[in-house]
Amino acid sequence: MTSEAGACPLVGGASLCACARGLAHGGGAGAGWPFAEPPLLLTGACRCPVRPGTARSGAEQSGARLGGPARAAAMGSRASTLLRDEEIEEIKKETGFSHSQITRLYSRFTSLDKGENGTLSREDFQRIPELAINPLGDRIINAFFPEGEDQVNFRGFMRTLAHFRPIEDNEKSKDQNGPEPLNSRSNKLHFAFRLYDLDKDDKISRDELLQVLRMMVGVNISDEQLGSIADRTIQEADQDGDSAISFAEFVKVLEKVDVEQKMSIRFLH
């Protein structure tokens, strides 16, 4: 299943997290750097967190472009007045984000809402540089929209971003009988699985795997090599002999992969 130690073609951590980081923080200079070496996308090596001493966080860069910390603080204050307290509390319970994170993300949401109608369209998402340059951009955008819908409201936006929220230490000891958090390992894997399951039949076929791999690496790897990767992946993952990968098989293959690291980004508190 792996082409090298810890490498797996079923996890595109850098690809996913860079887009989520751009959605949350507004990107900025260097936001697209995970795509400079496309073959790394096959390893699932998530390198999205800002390297110490090399760059500011996306939010800091965004704040600088908007006129510095004072302007960013003003946006957060405005957001808190537009969101009712009961709405913020409901979103906190549903997503696990803090009050300040929700107001910051609401500012980001309203900046993307060019029509100023309280929802985002696919066109709004396509203006985001991280998504525009991401080979899986369309697949990630689709993940924000319920079946048959062409608009997403703030709550839906937050539900999707919550999949990328790191699991805090105090959450690991919560009541196991309560609802499963959106950022749980299982839900993170479900999010990744849906990017591959193009026809939504709850299985990843060879053709689907090949299509997504081709999106990820473009012309950097030949069709013959991609076919070999797809065949080997299916062969090693398929346990019931149907020549496809079910979600259970997907989970089994990735049981030793640090999904928390590969599908988490840091949100400012």
Image: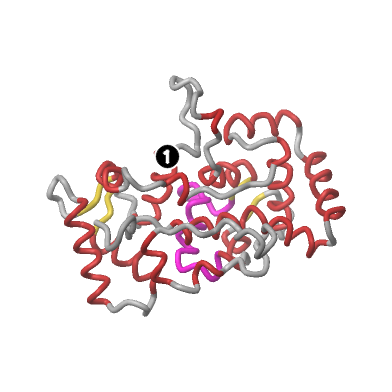
Residue at x 83%, y 48% (from the top left corner): 73
- Say which of 231 and 41 sits in front: 41
Q: Dividing the image into 4 quarters, which one contains the C terminus?
A: top right
- Residue 18, how many percent across, how many down? 54, 60
Residue at x 61%, y 66% (from the top left corner): 31
Q: Dividing the image into 4 quarters, which one contains the N terminus?
A: bottom left
Residue at x 65%, y 65% (from the top left corner): 54
Residue stretch rendered in magenta on the structure: 131-151
Left or right of residue 152: residue 198: left
Residue 43 part of the magenta segment? no
Residue that badge 1 annotates: 185
Q: Give the total of numbered labels.
A: 1
Residue type highlighted by circle 1: Arg
Q: Residues within 10 Å of mark 1 (few under 14, many from 20)?
A: some
- Residue 234, how many percent across, how many down? 21, 57
- Residue 75, how many percent across, how many down? 81, 50
Callout 1: SS: helix
- Say which of 163 and 111 sits in front: 163
Q: Residue furthest front?
A: 53
Residue 140 part of the magenta segment? yes
Q: Quadrant of residue 69?
A: bottom right
Residue at x 85%, y 55% (from the top left corner): 71
From the image, give the main secondary structure of the stretch colored magenta. Answer: loop
Q: Is residue 23 above or below residue 163?
A: below
Q: Quadrant of residue 52?
A: bottom right
Colour scheme: secondary structure
